[in-house]
Image: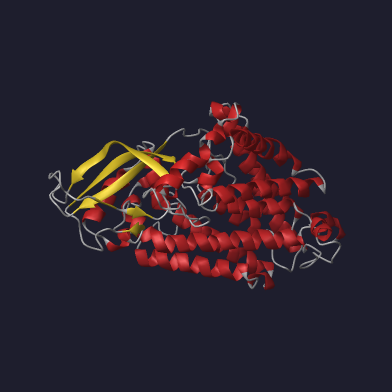
Amino acid sequence: MDALGWLAGTDYTIAREILQRGVAALYVVAFLSAVAQFPALLGEHGLLPAPRYLRNAYARRQPTLFRLRYSDRLLRAVAWTGAALSALVVVGVLQLTPSYVFVPAFLIVWFLYLSIVNIGQTFYGFGWESLICEAGFTVAFLGAWDTSPPITVVILVRWLVFRLEFGAGMIKMRGDRSWRDLTALYYHHETQPMPNPLSRTAHLLPKWWHRVEVLGNHFAQLVVPWLLFLPQPVASIAAAVIILTQLWLVATGNFAWLNWITIVLAFAGVSDGAWRWLTGGAPTGGIGSPDVPVWYAAVALLASALLVALSWWPLRNLFRRRQLMNASFNRWHLVNAYGAFGSVTKERFEVVVEGTEDDPHDPAARWLEYGFKGKPGEVRMLPRQFAPYHLRLDWLMWFLALGSRDSPWFEVFLLRLLEADRPTLRLLRLDPFAGRPPRSVRARMYLYRFATREEKRGTGARWVRSEVGMLVPPVGLRG
């Protein structure tokens, strides 16, 4: 047992609680999101039906419970099961079981969500989907209370944070010039995919502050991640810097669970000793066994060796000239490459979808706008806070406005509006026809910008928009 003493991360018992419960809480959000949105987006009658996707050879090679059969009922059963198991971790019930129960249970959560991601197509093509999969697999091996958290797994969680932050920093420096000349934040708060209630306030801050923001971002993503691997208290300080910068991103935008899970994972750098210092010397830590049983040491070291072996490809990617962003190197979404906003959009375009019950060719036809839950639409409406919940349709609408070519779902979306399809309408904030099918729908493109303080006082509008052109001319069911 003494020979294995080095493996016991006895100074990271509080970190283990935060890591496992925090990641599990975000799994609850992710599974509930699937219950609410997957059938309408990807179900049997969805915009990109999963059964049709599963008929191609590539899909059948993916690890998923739905490989042989998909149904909306089975999807809901998988999602509710995953949410229930995750909730047991959040409240600490599963931690009371032996690690030979806890670890497989957490890995079941991971595989259930992986099964959903691997048939989610465009609607699940986000870096934070791979991130939550990798995080779930890794923190599972921190074990239950019958073992001390293995230090190798704690370090591998830090390695995940390093790739997440340093990868994002490098993709920015290699990408848009605005990150290098410190002007990126002149635009970002206004043009980010889904603004929140404070985004306009952040955008209207002085330009010198935006330059400070960019410098702070470079420091937090290019310098601080290296400090996570230094002895305490340096690692705890580095983790605190990452957490604080992520909280600023939480306060000024809606990025699903990306910032939230980064905050959770950064606690892998915070020692129990740091918590004792924060609480003025009050007794903290020591949650669970101080030892790592021999049998569990073998399990933890085997898992650690697997993750180290898989690290070669993302490590090489970090220093490649043509760095990949948000890439998975295996079908299991383990040890991925991450990054965000390698290019900054300078102008904000929005697709506005409208319908009419009148003759669409009549110049006097009354067109009514469909309201989305998260994306900007009506100019007076205050953007809402949704993160860590992920509004997948709204995010895809942002990519559509940028000219995404991977948008076959949009035609089907317009068809569902013409049919007044209830599951589809539930994805929206406002159906102007109260469940009735419109005669025709169309999609217009607008240029949006935040209203200045003077414009807001004069008109009450938070956005100023001007029409750019017609994306989809009026179409009806016969068209």
Q: Is residue 82 above or below residue 356?
A: below
Q: Position of residue 212 (x, y in %)?
A: 65, 35
Report the residue at 33% width, 55% height from top: 51
Q: Position of residue 380 (x, y in %)?
A: 40, 51
Q: Where residue 22 sits: x, y (%)?
A: 62, 60
- Of residues 370 and 62, the one nearer the viewer is 370
Please give left or right for residue 462 compared with residue 264 in the image.
left
Residue located at (58% from left, 63% from top): 25
Residue at the (53%, 70%) spot, across then down: 84
Q: Looking at this view, is 182 or 281 the one in front? A: 182
In this rendering, is residue 285 above or below 413? below
Q: Residue furthest front?
A: 458
* Residue 223 shows in the view: yes
Foreground of the two, 145 or 325: 325
Quick check: can you spot residue 322? no
Tell me which colouring the rendered structure shows: secondary structure
The quadrant of the rendering that contains the N terminus is: bottom right
From the viewer's perspective, is 333 left or right of 161?
left
> Of 310 and 285, which appears nearest the observer?
285
Picture coordinates of residue 344, whole percent (x, y) = 50, 34
Q: Quadrant of residue 143?
A: bottom right
Report the side of 325 relative to 418 (left or right): right
